[in-house]
Image (cartoon, rainbow, N blue to C red):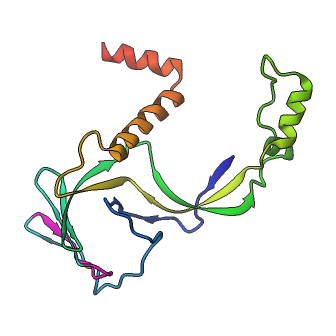
């Protein structure tokens, strides 16, 4: 199991981009003010960076974005996370959850399944993993998905994955009373 620990000093706000290419680098890059200086001209946001490439970004009137990465035109669509959701970037630590009792950390379930006897349950308890801590590094509230020369299609695997994940999360975290209240208000 995993648990997320909020940053003590507050987390940084990120702009997340999913590019249609493979870059053999993960993590932040040190970009100086000289290389990264967003400006706005007549409603268009122009961004220039010189970290290995020149990169211009324009916000089109339909809400899509256009950028040039190493001379190739990219078109992007921004997906905003729902209001009650928050995107996080985290780092795995070697710490375990110290606030929980040993029993809570090592027990996967307390009640045996129908076909499980007491011996099987004890075996599961001894094999349970401790709760590991993930440390929050940054957060985001939108993701921009980029495609070559045109906007990513509605059936793009990344776009579809995010939409389906949110729908799935809503379904498993909604109680039956929430469902009946929402159906009453929709009538």
| Nearer to me, 58 or 127 | 127
**Location of residue 40 in the rendering, given as x and y in whole percent from the top left corner:** 15, 70
Q: Residue at x 28, y 84 (%)?
A: 35
**Location of residue 74 in the rendering, given as x and y in whole percent from the top left corner:** 21, 61
Q: Residue at x 10, y 54 (%)?
A: 61
Dominant SS in magenta: loop
Q: Quadrant of the C terminus?
A: top left
* Residue 27 shown in magenta: no
**Location of residue 86 in the rendering, given as x and y in whole percent from the top left corner:** 45, 50
Left or right: 48 with respect to 121?
Answer: left
**Location of residue 73 in the rendering, given as x and y in whole percent from the top left corner:** 17, 65
The answer to whether residue 34 is above or below residue 60 is: below
Left or right: 84 with respect to 128?
Answer: left
The answer to whether residue 147 is above or below residue 119 is: below
* Residue 52 shown in magenta: yes
Left or right: 102 with respect to 14?
Answer: right
Bounds of the magenta segment: 43-53
Displayed quadrant of residue 45: bottom left
């Amino acid at each position: 199991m995993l648990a997320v620990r909020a940053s003590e000093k507050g987390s940084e706000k990120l702009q997340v981009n999913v590019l249609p290419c493979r870059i053999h680098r993960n993590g932040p890059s040190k970009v100086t003010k000289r290389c990264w200086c967003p400006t706005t001209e007549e409603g268009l946001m122009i961004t220039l960076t010189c970290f290995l490439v020149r990169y211009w970004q324009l916000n089109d009137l339909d809400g899509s974005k256009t950028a040039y990465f190493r001379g190739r035109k990219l078109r992007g669509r921004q997906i905003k996370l729902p209001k009650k959701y928050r995107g996080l970037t985290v780092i795995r630590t070697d710490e375990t959850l110290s606030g929980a009792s040993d029993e809570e950390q090592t027990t996967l379930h307390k009640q045996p399944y129908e076909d499980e006897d007491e011996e099987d349950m004890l075996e599961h308890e001894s094999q349970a993993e401790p709760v590991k801590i993930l440390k929050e590094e940054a957060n985001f509230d939108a993701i921009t998905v980029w495609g070559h020369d045109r906007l990513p299609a509605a059936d793009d695997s990344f776009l579809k994955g995010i939409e389906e994940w949110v729908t799935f999360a809503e379904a498993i975290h909604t109680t039956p009373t929430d469902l009946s209240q929402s159906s009453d208000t929709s009538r």
